[in-house]
Amino acid sequence: MKRVVTIVIIVGIVLGFAGALYYLYQKNQEDPVVYETEQASTQTIVKKTVATGNIVPKEEVLIKPNISGIIEEIYIEAGNKVKAGDLIAKIRVIPNVSALQSAKDAVATAKINLDNEKKNFERQKSLFEKGVISANEFDNAEVAYKRVEQNYTSARENYEIVKTGTTSGLESSANTLIRSTVEGMVLDVPVKEGNQVIESNNFNDGTTLAVLADVNKMIFDGKVDESEVGKIKEDLPLEVTVGAIENKTFDAVLDYIAPKGVEENGAIQFNIKGSLNKADTTFIRAGLSANASIILDRANEVLAIKEALVQFDDKTKQPYVEVEKGDQEFERQDLELGISDGIYVEVKEGISKDDKIKVWNQIKPAGFTAN
């Protein structure tokens, strides 16, 4: 029995020794780790944040009627360019029954006064011709007659205005003819012929007949998250890209940042606005979705390396890289860094353009397995 145990122990020792030899042999067969290197390059680094929004006119003008009625004719359509004073639409007045009756009664009253004053005037004229009354008395009678005659004319014109919205001699300025108040492009005509419209007054906004705007003065209207709003300020440059216009970037300037945020989908959003460069003549349709890159900082043509090459000291958090001093021999070199765009980072001090920097976190080739 003891002899069997001894044999087993000897066999175990032999197998263990053979395994150790095989392990050492395999280790010697592994390729040594060879680190690749990269060099710094000259880059233009732009630090920015992105806002989403739309391109809209700086100002939109709503054309509303000064009288209620039915749209009889529309003279424009969306996309037309108009000048101040151009006809927009014509309205047929539907008179108010009470106002119409009052105007009609006023005409009847004025006619009675006119007939009475006419008889008096003719009587005074006859007496004047016979020399019974003085010229002064006749002049007074004539003035009174003309005054009543004018009142009758005014009452008739007022009746026509209440009934139709206009009268003879007022065609060019009639309330029934709606004209453009500004020069610009028609963005929308939200009504059709036959629609009923309500006048604009102190108690009602009125019906919008057309929306006009100067399409040469467009702005970016967007929103930024609360985590980014603290980084931006007025007058920062914007680079605006419009989804519908490929390979084109529009310059703009940040004009406005809302002082109060609005909650949307659980996050606080702040409205921002930026005026597009007027020098660019590209036609942009109002309402197109767009993205604006807000330029927070820029470094032109500076020495830079990829952020992936930078390491940080565990204790001091000081950034550094490992620079090659010999064949696969590297030495730590502390850095002073500038701005970063997330891919490249500016190097102010620590290395030169000729230094070869160790790629310390290089990706192993596909299919590589460690023994």
Image (tube, helix red, strand yellow):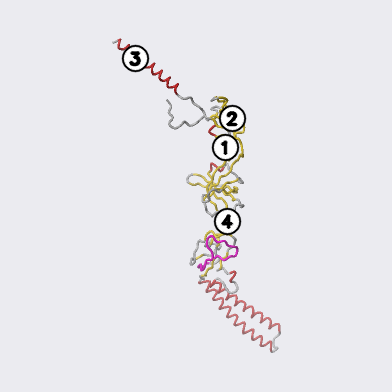
Q: Are marks 1 and 4 in contact (CB under 8 Å)?
A: no
In the displayed orientation, state which residue is furthest to the top.
Answer: 2
Magenta-colored span = 68-88
Instruction: Identify the residue position indicated by label 2 in the image.
Output: 355
- Looking at the picture, how far across and down is residue 72, in whole percent? 51, 69
User: For the residue marked with disc 2, what is the amino acid?
Assistant: Asp
Instruction: Identify the residue position indicated by label 4 in the image.
Output: 215
Helix, strand or loop at label 1? It is strand
Instruction: Identify the residue position indicated by label 3 in the image.
Output: 11
Helix, strand or loop at label 2? It is loop
| Mark with earlier residue (1, 3) | 3
Mark 3 burial class by Cα count in 10 Å: few <14, some 14-19, many 20+: few
Helix, strand or loop at label 4? It is loop
- In the image, residue 363 lies in the stretch drawn in magenta: no
Work out how far the residue at label 1 is from the one at label 3, CA to CA, in angstroms.
Answer: 63 Å
| Mark with earlier residue (3, 4) | 3
User: For the residue marked with disc 4, what is the amino acid?
Assistant: Val
- Quarter of the figure that contains the N terminus: top left
